[in-house]
Image (cartoon, rainbow, N blue to C red):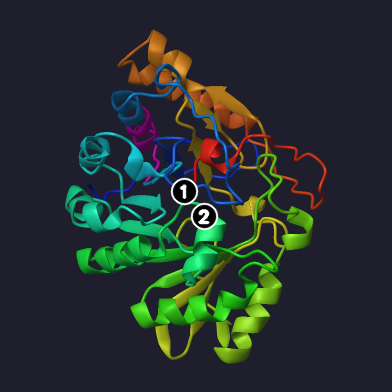
Amino acid sequence: MSSHLQPSNLIDRFDRRIDYLRLSVTDRCDFRCVYCMAEDMTFLPRSQILSLEQLYDVAAAFVALGVSKIRLTGGEPLVRNNLMTLVERLGQLNGLKQLHLTTNGARLDKYAAALKAAGVTGVNISLDSLDESKFRQLTRTGDLSKVLRGIDAAIDAGFSRIKLNAVILRGRNDDEALALVEFARHKGIDISFIEEMPLGIIDEHSRALSFCSSDELRELIDFRYPLSASGESTGGPSTYYRMVDSPSRVGFISPHSHNFCHLCNRVRVTVEGRLLLCLGNEHSADLKATLDEFPGDSERLQQVIRSAMSLKPERHHFELNDNEPQIVRFMNMTGG
């Protein structure tokens, strides 16, 4: 993987330069987190999803267009059969500076060392609770001990960046925010708190009633561990804060309370080949049609991607209510 950077050729109508691709490798997951999926999910048939070869072709096309950061997402990426063959090829792409992975952590104890060796530079690990029974309630199927082993395996593997992601729901795990910060401090890694995003129709809880804002959490944490705005960016949507007595950073991803659309530098490709120009809109282009009809034609694929930039909206609009969401696809279908 080369650190040589070329300017991105992907610029949208609002003069935002796109240099970050979130590439979903599967819609499947071994967890059923309450804010991400329904309990009884139907997944895509194999015929509708991109092959590993097609996923590589998409990644290579974006890198040729100047994208320097790729994050592999899902579902849970590590449930995809033979994923490591794709990771190893991506790790060799000239011009790709950062190759990251978002995971629930349950399989990291098995894969962390191999991922690092293949060129993965950073991992985000979901961790919403440190209480076994609460963790099981939030993930429905998750085993906290496996995730904790996975976090330790990631630390041992020596990734340049490890971050925990915690979705905080009022009345469910908002009382654990400080404990999660303390855990991140103890491990010497970063943590981001994420406001729940209204994707997909759920009946397990009321999103309006469970909403917990970033401002509220930041005030709570600041009382115990004074936070100072760092101004740092990792190319994603987190706003980061530093603590004077720890190398760990605390981030907040606030799609409701602090819209970050004007800084958006990223697009998503779903595992069925939809190029999503915005997390909170349905603006998309069909890359699978081009991949199927013209296999190996990178120039044609790049042209489709370039043309799609005109579809990228100025911003999303997430409204807090219990009516049907504007976006009916679940987060596992969206890609991380």
Q: How far apart are the two marked residues, 2 and 1, measured between alpha carbons?
A: 6 Å
Residue 87 higher or lower than 252, as above or below: above
- Verify CB contact (< 8 Å) between mark 2 and mark 1: yes
Residue 59 colored in magenta in the image: yes
Residue at the extreme front: 133
Q: Residue furthest top?
A: 293
Count of numbered labels shown in the rendering: 2
- Label 2: how many residues lie within 10 Å, few (<14), some (14-19) or many (20+)? many
Residue 322 higher or lower than 268, as above or below: below
**Residue 199 is drawn in which quadrant?**
top right
Secondary structure of residue under mark 1: loop
Residue at 47%, 56% (x, y): give it.
235
Label 2: element kind: helix
Q: Which residue is mark 1?
A: 31
Judging by the rendered image, the residue that carries numbered circle 2 is 139
Magenta residue check for 95: no
Along the polypeptide, which appears first: circle 2 or circle 1?
1
Res. 128 in view:
no
Residue 241 image position (x, y, % from top left) = 53, 76
How far from the left and from the top, in percent, is residue 47? 41, 16
Three-letter amino acid code at the position of disc 1 = Phe
Residues in magenta, as a range = 58-68
The location of residue 316, given as percent across then percent down, is 71, 44
Question: Closest to the observer: 244 or 199?
Answer: 199
Q: Amino acid at mark 2?
A: Thr
